[in-house]
Image: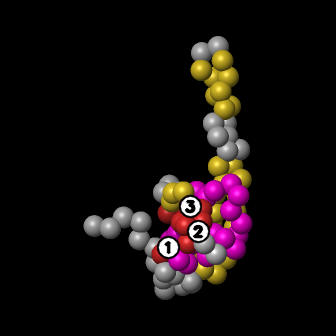
Amino acid sequence: MNQEFLLQLITAPVVTEKSAAASDKHNQYVFKVNKTATKTDIKAAVEKLFEVTVESVQTLNVKGKTKRHGRTLGKRSDVKKAYVRIKSGQEIEFISA
């Protein structure tokens, strides 16, 4: 696979209380990914970027909410999330001190 393509798949990590709990309990990390990304692409990208062994990938399509802006209605964009489980004993550091 093309290295440039793999680097563009992962948009950002999702850092919330729910993702922190998944990280602590199940050794899972949550990422926002490109809508066209497949599970095998996500697995290869995470292994390449963070140098860890990925056990499984679960994806989730989040539909954007409809919001009102005065009289007009607007819509937030749809997002695809990936829950990535890595091998026990390994860790991903998002923020370096």
Which contiguous range is marked in magenta? 23-48
> Crowding at label 1, few (<14), some or many (≥20) Cα neighbours within 10 Å?
few
Q: Which residue is mark 3?
A: 8
Q: Return the disc, 3 or 1, that comes first in the chain's sequence.
A: 3
Amino acid on which the number 3 mark rests in the picture: Gln
Q: Which secondary structure, mark 2?
A: helix
| Contact flag, marks 2 and 1 (Cβ < 8 Å) | yes
Q: Which secondary structure, mark 3?
A: helix
Residue 45 screen position, x and y as percent: 58, 72
Identity of the residue drawn at 60% across and 80% down: 54
Amino acid on which the number 1 mark rests in the picture: Leu
Q: For residue 6, which numbered disc appears in the image?
A: 2
Return the residue found at the far top. Answer: 71
In which quadrant is the N terminus drawn? bottom right
> Crowding at label 2, few (<14), some or many (≥20) Cα neighbours within 10 Å?
some
Residue 46 screen position, x and y as percent: 56, 73
Foreground disc of the pair 2, 1: 2
Q: Which secondary structure, mark 1?
A: helix
> Crowding at label 3, few (<14), some or many (≥20) Cα neighbours within 10 Å?
few
Q: Where 28 sits versus 33, above or below?
A: below
Residue 16 screen position, x and y as percent: 50, 55
Amino acid on which the number 2 mark rests in the picture: Leu
Specify whether residue 36 is painted magenta.
Answer: yes
Identity of the residue drawn at 28% across and 67% down: 97
Specify whether residue 32 is painted magenta.
Answer: yes
Question: Could you tell me how far apart the alpha carbons at marks 2 and 3 are, in whole angstroms?
Answer: 5 Å
| Contact flag, marks 2 and 3 (Cβ < 8 Å) | yes
Q: Which residue is mark 1?
A: 49
